[in-house]
Structure formats: C-alpha cells, structure tokens
Amino acid sequence: MGTKEALELIVDNAENPSLNYAINYARYGLGLTEGTEEMRVQCLYVLSNIGGWRASKKFDITKEQIADVRSAIKKEAGVK
C-alpha cells in the first residue's frame, strides 16, 4: 500500500469518530507530493491522530488494513 492509498482509506472512513482530525490531515496530504518534506511532516500529523483507530464490526475495515495504513504512513514519515 502506498502513501496516497493509505490517506484515501482514512478519508473513506470519515464516519469513524476515532479518526476526527486525521481526516482533514489526510485530505490535505492527498494534494502533496510523496517524498517531500511537507508530506513527511503531514504524515507525522496523521500518525499522531490515528492512534485510537481500531477495527470494529460497525465499520467496514479490518485490523490488517489499519496496520497497512499505519505502515505506509510511517514509511513516508520516516518513523520506524
């Protein structure tokens, strides 16, 4: 999963209240160029706001998808 795909998945799950601020950060990130410092910083903002995002039966997303999103965004942000 790439960074843009990960950000799109966050935006697609906007109804999930645990994503509050991450949605706007992800939307903004979709307009940025991957590999830039601005995108790296934006991904740090997104990461800090998806910490409480969990899979549930109420929302159509799996824990594996969430793990893939986190992994892609961490990679772009340069976080291990």
Image: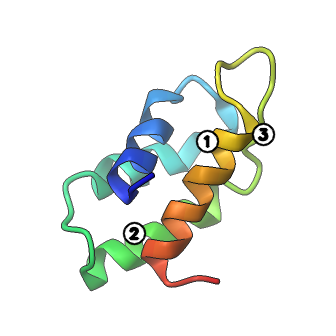
Q: Which residue is mark 1?
A: 19
Q: Residue at x 64, y 28 (%)?
A: 16
Mark 1 lies on a secondary structure that is helix
Between label 2 and label 3, give the one nearer the viewer: 3
User: In the figure, is residue 42 to the left or right of 29?
Assistant: right
Q: Which residue is mark 3?
A: 54
Q: In x, y percent, where is residue 73?
A: 50, 64
Q: Quadrant of residue 17?
A: top right
Whichever of labels 1 and 3 marks the residue nearer the N terminus, that label is 1
Identity, as a three-letter code, of the amino acid under mark 2: Gln
In the picture shown, does residue 12 fall above or below 60? below
Query: What label sits on residue 5 in the rendered view?
Result: none
**Pointer 3 local density, CA inside 10 Å: few below 14, some 14–19, many at least 20:** some
User: In the figure, is residue 74 to the left or right of 53?
Assistant: left
Q: Residue at x 50, y 62 (%)?
A: 72
Q: In x, y percent, where is residue 62?
A: 71, 31
Identity, as a three-letter code, of the amino acid under mark 3: Arg
Image quarter in which the C terminus is found:
bottom right
Q: How many marks?
A: 3
In three-dimensional space, the C-alpha distance between marks 2 and 3, rounded to whole angstroms, equals 21 Å
Between label 1 and label 3, give the one nearer the viewer: 3
In three-dimensional space, the C-alpha distance between marks 1 and 3, rounded to whole angstroms, equals 10 Å
Whichever of labels 2 and 1 marks the residue nearer the N terminus, that label is 1
Q: Quadrant of residue 41?
A: bottom left
Q: Residue furthest top?
A: 58
User: In the figure, is residue 51 to the left or right of 3?
Assistant: right
Q: In x, y percent, where is residue 69?
A: 56, 51
Q: Which residue is mark 2?
A: 42
**Pointer 1 local density, CA inside 10 Å: few below 14, some 14–19, many at least 20:** many
In the picture shown, does residue 64 fall above or below 31? above
